[in-house]
Image (cartoon, helix red, strand yellow):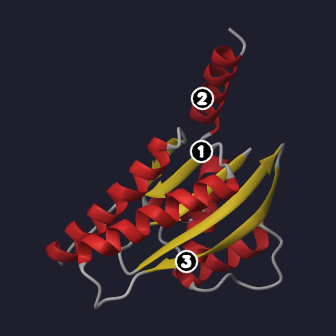
Amino acid sequence: MVVLGIDPGYAIVGYGAVEFAGSNCRSLGYGVITTNAETDFNLRLKTIYDNCSLLIAKCKPDCMAIEKLYFQSNQKTAIMVAEARGVIILAAQNAGVDIFEYTPLQVKTVVTGYGKAKKAQVMEMTRRLLKLTEVPKPDDAADALAIALCHTQAAGTALRRTLVERNKTKYQ
């Protein structure tokens, strides 16, 4: 099973694809989609959508795991990230990819075993779990891999239900 993890943003969108087989996970690749601050915001959203669509077509994920939004202060930033997150979800939906959402607390808890883990701890555990030689860079890509790992570890019941339903549909 291939899980595409997404760390949403409008300047930088982190992505990481993880293959999950049995109890083994391995990274299939990771990186970021970036947009230029001087570009009209609507065009930035189009760039994110187009690149996510290409990424989904390339890695053919069975599902996408995306971080839920959590903001305490800047509402303008929250709205812009929410809009970017919307076009990312639309790209997955249009491609028929199942979408799962996780809070930062859930990701930290699953990856490190501690919900208040520091960013460096999450990144190091992501490296270890995926048996990578170094911590993925930039941070947004590492976060996306952690989100994908969270899904492979935490969504057992929902994941199995989705696969069972998909298999029923395929063979009817």
Residue 60's x, y, as percent? 67, 49
- Say left or right for 119 vs 22: left
Q: Amino acid at mark 3?
A: Val
Q: Amino acid at mark 1?
A: Cys
Number of residues whose C-alpha sits closer than 10 Å to that of mark 2, classed few (under 14), some (14–19) or many (20 or more): some
Q: Earlier in the sequence, mark 2 or mark 3?
A: 3
Query: Considering only vertical position in the picture, is 33 above or below 36?
Result: above
Q: CA distance from mark 1 to mark 2?
A: 10 Å
Mark linked to residue 131: none
Which image quarter: residue 109? bottom right
Q: Secondary structure at mark 1?
A: strand
Q: Secondary structure at mark 2?
A: helix
Which image quarter: residue 88? bottom left
Q: Are marks 1 and 2 in contact (CB under 8 Å)?
A: yes
Q: Tell us which disc is closer to us: 2 or 3.
A: 3
Q: Secondary structure at mark 3?
A: strand
Query: Considering only vertical position in the picture, is 91 above or below 93?
Result: below
x 55%, y 83%: residue = 139
Q: CA distance from mark 2 to mark 3?
A: 28 Å
- Say left or right for 128 vs 158: right
Q: Which residue is mark 3?
A: 32
- Say left or right for 40 vs 121: left
Q: Amino acid at mark 2?
A: Thr
Q: Are marks 1 and 3 in contact (CB under 8 Å)?
A: no
Front one among 57 and 138: 57
Q: Earlier in the sequence, mark 1 or mark 3?
A: 3
Q: Which residue is mark 1?
A: 63
